[in-house]
Structures are given as structure tokens and as C-alpha cells.
Amino acid sequence: MKGDHTTGGKPHIQLVIRRALEGTPKIELTAKFPCNGNFKVQLPVWRPGRYELGNFGRYIYGVQGLNVSGIWEKLHKADLHQWQVPADVNTIRWTFFADLFNAGSTGAAEDILYINPVNCFLYHPNHSDWGYSIDLVDVPNDWPVATGLPRVNGMLYARDVQQAMDSPILAAASLTHTEYESNGIPFHIWVYGKDQPDVKSFKRDHLAFTESQIAHFGTFPAEHYHFMYVLPEREVRHGVEHEDTTVIALGPSAKSQTQAGYDELIGIASHELYHAWNVKRIRPAEWMPYDFSRACPSRMGYVAEGVTTYMGDLFLFESGVVDLKGWCRLMERLLDRHVNNPGRLNSSVADSGYDTWLDGYEPGVPGRKGSIYVEGAVLAFLCDVRIMQLTGSEASLQTAMRMLWEQFGVERIGLIESDYWSVLNEVAGATDAMEDLRLNYADGTKESWDDLVAAMDWQGLALTKTIKDGRWHVSIAHS
Ligand SMILES: [Zn+2]
């Protein structure tokens, strides 16, 4: 909303954040709530983009409240991630561990303050309408601050809990900034790190996949967009999507100077931008809006992450960032992981998606589950080819995704499985066009190899696999 650049006089939480760098790096957060005491404050238990319990309470050293006598008293827990605020307290102070530098964490050092509010901001469970004013009190005035939040006179403002939790903040003594425009939307690229990718090619490749994705969706969902790159000196490879930003972490930073590291960054970036439509707006009903206080399992991870993984790579090819050979290498890597995971034959990708909350981001017990990223992307590929086959290539999976954007995403109507498959069937031209794919590969655990070979063959590509030392190796060649 234009002009809505502060909390506009609405009740909001006044938050002051400072770094505490002696010993283990931490941040100290002080919040004045717009209500009198005797209420509870809640810390999110998960963060969108990672569909498991984050248990962020483990990073909190302690929570205190300022009472009417001007004394800080210890607050007691009402639940694992909830604290009770007594009647005579409305200002709360807590200390949070800040030595993690992945794409969804919070970290602080002499030259940086990097915050993902969803792991460290407390909120009032009955007041998701309360926004925040955020004062980064010890950040020097001359430090650049990258964030999707509006910034007025050095203060940041979030209009409500949903926006605050979805808006990472990156402030650093040195932050490279470059900007490009597509379809009238400003896109910002911010990079923190000792070594950084070549700016010229980085910007050119971002522009290419951005233009291509917007052309295929028709419109872009946000007024601006920020790519925030955190390139620390530690080992990391990670990206997280938000409403109008993404954070991408890759380290050590020198990796960004190698071709492989550069390709990784661009690959993650295309994936995360696709999320601006798919999952941030075309969103499973279970996550619309986000309930940060409990686990929210959904069977639709194969849409959220599978379609995004497949499309993120496909748009690299569509936009000329990679050639056909490059796309084949990306698909080989994906199919390698697919065929070598017997878990996909035990638990369907829909069931595996529901269970990410149990073991979706770790290997888990052998042979139990599939991956919403890998098996989801394989399913997306089979759906894409099916739609093209049935429509003489007049339509594709992207046609369906655009329709989902227009019918569900724009209006923020939560998506359910039957709606997703109805739209794909409609685009493919028959009510049962995708039924076998849904039964076999979304809800079922059928071996996919023959269908994959046929789909690749239809695209003029020969898919083969060989086994060596008990592991399959997949290869795709021009037939
Ligand atoms: Zn993703």
C-alpha cells in the first residue's frame, strides 16, 4: 500500500535491537508491547521455507520483563515457546544466539547484523494485526541496510506479524548493491562477503531469468524485490524465499568466483524468484496465512518445492542462462538422486511432504521416504511433458501455474490438492488427463523409469542409466 510506510498510528510493538558481541555473538531485543501486562508472548516454532519444527527457543538465553518499579525480572515459560508476562510488565527483553549464517538464521559480528525475524521476534498470539517499529540502535548510520521493509528516518516498519516474520534484514558495513528493472519493478541485488561474483554477469543473468519468469506469469506479485546474498567464510549452501526478498547463502565466499559456485548461486536465485509466485502466493491452504505457533503439515510440498525446483532450472534454459546441454546436466543430477532413492517406492511424495515435519531435512531411516524437491520435480517434469503432448505444445505446466497464479495466488486463496489437479487437467484438455500421474507419482509409489524414458524421448533426448558399485548413474543425450 502506498503511503503506509509506518504503522500509521496503529498499535504496534516497539522493538529495539542491539548486538552483544562479547564472547558468543548474540543480539539483545527489547520490545514494548501496546498493552498492559498479564498476557503471553510467543516465539515462532518454524519458519516458512523449511517445513519442520525449528525450535528457535533453543537460541534464547533468557527473557526478562521490566516491572513498574523499574526492575528487570525473569519471565517464566507458559509453554516451550511461550512466556507469561505478569500484570505489571509490558516491556520485555531477551537475548538471542547470533552466530549462525545460513539463509534462514540470525547472525551478528563487528561488521554485520543479519536478522530473520521469524526465529527471534516475539509476538502476541492474539494480535497478529500488531506490526513492529524496529530500531537497529547500534547500526552506524552509514551502513547500508537491505530489507523489503519500509525504512523511514532509519527506522524499519512492519505492518503486521505476517510481514515482519517474512522480512529478513541485512545491515553491514560493506554491502555491494546493484539494481535492475524489469516490467517497471525495481530488483535489488545485495552482496555481503569477502569474495563476490562478477557484478556484470551476475546482473545480466538475474535480468534474463527475471524477464523470462515475469513474461510467463504475466505479472509480478510485489512492488520491489531484493536478492540478499550472504557469502560468509564458513561452509554453507542455502536459499530461503520471502514475499518480496530472498536470502541466499553460499560459503566460503571464494566459491562465488568459481564457475560451479557461480552456477549454484544463479540456480538458487532462479528457484527463489519462482517462489515469489509459487508458495508465497500460490500457497497450500495449510500455510495461508502462516500459523507460526504449531506444526502445519501439508501434502502439497511437491507443488511448493517440486514444481519450483523443476521450473527454476527450466527458466535458466528458457532465458538462455544455460544451454540445452546445461539443462540436461541439471536434470541428470536430479534424476541421479531420484533413481538412487528407494524411499520413493515406500512413501509417496505427498506423504513424504506431509512428513517433512518429522524428517524432511535429514537423511532419515534408510528407504523410508521421498523428497519433495527431487521426486516433486520429477513429477513436475512428467506433468509438463504430458500437458505438452496433449496440447500439441500449445500449453505446458507453466500455463497451469499461470492460471493458478491468476485464480488463487492473486487473491491469496489457499490451494488444495483437488484444485491443483483440476487446473492441470483443464490446461491439458480433459478431466482425467493427469489422473494416472497423480495416482502413480503424487499419491502412489510406482517405479517411474519407463515413463521418464518415454517423456525424455518425446523431447528428443535419450535417457539411460548404468550401475556402478551399487549406485545408478543417469545420462541424458541427444537421440
Ligand atoms: Zn524452494
Image (tube, grey):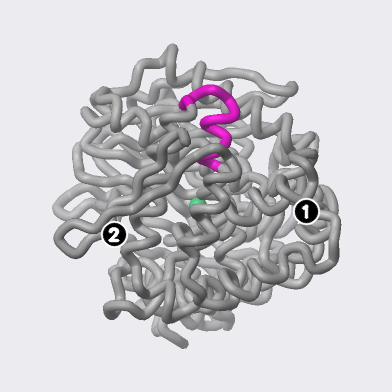
Q: Residue placed farthest to the bottom in the image?
A: 78
Which quarter of the picture shows residue 458?
top right
Which quarter of the picture shows residue 350?
bottom right
Number of the front mark, 2 or 1: 1
Q: Is mark 2 within 8 Å of ligand 1?
A: no
User: Which element carries disc 2, helix, strand or loop?
Assistant: strand
Residue tagged by mark 1?
Answer: 404
Residue tagged by mark 2?
Answer: 97
In the drawing, does residue 299 fall left or right of residue 204?
Answer: right
User: Which element carries disc 1, helix, strand or loop?
Assistant: helix
Q: In this view, does 267 lie above or below 357?
A: above
Comparing 106 with 461, the one in front is 461
Comparing 150 with 471, the one in front is 471
Comparing 261 with 194, the one in front is 261
Identified by mark 1, the residue type is Leu
Mark 1 nearby-residue class (10 Å; few <14, some 14–19, many ≥20)? many
In the drawing, does residue 224 fall left or right of residue 84?
Answer: right
- Whether residue 68 is visible, yes or no, is no
Residue 14 location (% of width, % of height): 57, 54
Residue 123 location (% of width, % of height): 56, 67
Residue 38 location (% of width, % of height): 57, 83
Q: Residue placed farthest to the top in the image?
A: 200
Q: Residue at x 54, y 60 (%)?
A: 451
Q: In this view, does 126 lie above or below 425?
A: below
Q: In this view, does 363 lie above or below 176?
A: below
Q: What stretch is highlighted in magenta?
A: 312-323
Labelled disc at residue 213: none
Q: Residue at x 45, y 28 (%)?
A: 190
Q: Does the magenta stretch include residue 52?
A: no
